[in-house]
Image: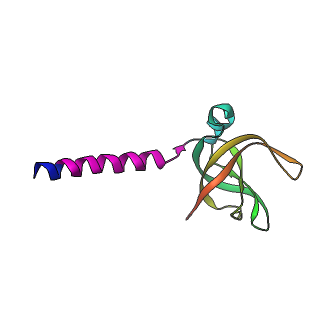
Amino acid sequence: MYLAKRVGLISLVLIGAVLLTACPEKETISRINADPGRYRDKEVGIVGNVTDSYGVLGTGAYEIDDGTGRIWVVTTRGVPSRGSRVGAKGKVHTGFAIQGRSFGTVLQETDRQVKSK
């Protein structure tokens, strides 16, 4: 009985550790824009409303406003429509350009959830 409880507890701790390390840090856009070097190449999560979007053949960029600031999100999975509430996670990059247009600091999307309004 004691061994079964111990194995169960160890399993629970290991599962918890795996789940916690897989979650990106949720951050405000104003903090990312204020110190992009701190977040460079780190995965973060943001939530906000899409204010602008451009896409061609499944790739593109969309701008998210979380109430503290705005940031462009680049994607290879199509762009959400303007006005959508989106949760995006990805890596922060600076000096990003697409087809000659500079976007400065961007989030390169690795996952997205469209929230219902």
Horizontal side of 10 relative to 106 (left or right) equals: left
Magenta residue check for 54: no
Horizontal side of 45 relative to 107 (left or right) equals: left
Q: Residue furthest right?
A: 100
Q: Residue at x 10, y 53 (%)?
A: 1
What is the x, y in percent for residue 34?
A: 67, 32
- Magenta stretch? 6-26
What is the x, y in percent for residue 19?
A: 41, 50
Horizontal side of 16 relative to 8 (left or right) equals: right
Horizontal side of 62 relative to 16 (left or right) equals: right
What is the x, y in percent for residue 78?
A: 71, 65
Q: Residue furthest bottom?
A: 57
Q: Residue furthest front?
A: 3
What is the x, y in percent for residue 99?
A: 87, 53
User: Dividing the image into 4 quarters, which one contains the C terminus?
Assistant: bottom right
- Asked which colour scheme the image uses, the reply is rainbow
Magenta highlight: main SS: helix
Can you tell which quarter of the image residue 112 is in? bottom right
